[in-house]
Image (spheres, rainbow, N blue to C red):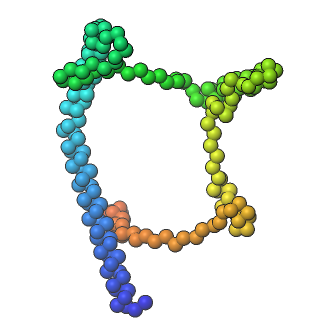
Amino acid sequence: MKTKEYGKLTKRIADYSKIAAELDKSEAIIKERQLNAARTLLPRHSQLKAKQSEIEAEVRVMAEANYQDLFGADDKRTHQTPFGKMQFRKSEYVDFDDAEKLILKIKVLCTQEKELAAKENREPRFTLAQLVRTSEAPNIEALERLDDLTLALFGAQRKHEDNFKITPPTIKSDKPAKATEMKEAA
């Protein structure tokens, strides 16, 4: 590489490093401003959220006490007012404390159900495949240890890439301080 070309290359890397430093500074300023803005707004935000939850609880008690008047007998679950609407929505979910214990119980009961169904000559009411999700994924670490011919048997291949990255210079701020300390100690 000619000196002129190398000089041009190092200048572009220097430009890149300068922009990286400016970006870091800009992002630090943005984060600082976000934190400052949030710091002044968070107490009021917390108060408003707490007040909103308090009002929602009060309105729910009133709506439940006056359910017939507000929602009627025709299974209407929404009531519109000039200031907004309130609504009861049904939902359900399955709750359990420990997933591992649940899976263990499912396995035991599925085995029992399968045996009972076989004795009674019927289909099981539930199976392990219905109640437990399983997922499989290739073991990349094990595959990496195989040679290329063996990988080809599986329809896989080893890929090689040249990754490129420019790293701006870093300043080790503790080194000058240590040098100063050593001089002062002498």
Q: Is residue 174 rendered to the left or right of residue 113?
A: left
Q: Residue at x 34, y 90 (%)?
A: 4
Q: What's the residue at 21%, 44% (across, down)?
A: 36
Residue 129 in the image: x percent, y percent?
A: 67, 34
| Total residue callouts | 0
Measured as percent of width and height from the top left, residue 52 is found at 24, 24
Q: Is residue 104 left or right of residue 13?
A: right
Task: From this view, report whether residue 141 is shown above or below residue 83.
Answer: below
Residue drawn at point x = 67 percent, y = 59 percent? 143
Q: Is residue 51 visible?
A: no
Q: Residue furthest front?
A: 74
Query: Which residue is most to the right?
Result: 119
Is 157 left, or right, of 115 in this rendering? Answer: left
Please state the horizontal and vertical placement of residue 149, each as a whole percent of the image: 73, 68
User: Could you say which is closer to the camera, residue 83 or residue 179?
Assistant: 83
Using residue 167 as the reference point, say whether residue 112 is left or right of it. right
Q: Quadrant of the C terminus?
A: bottom left
Q: Is residue 30 above or below residue 88?
A: below
Q: Quadrant of residue 73?
A: top left
Quarter of the picture holding the N terminus: bottom left
Residue 177 image-quadrant placement: bottom left
Where is residue 15? Give x, y as percent.
Answer: 30, 75
Compared with 6, 36 (above or below) is above
The residue lying toward the viewer, choosing from 71 and 43, is: 71
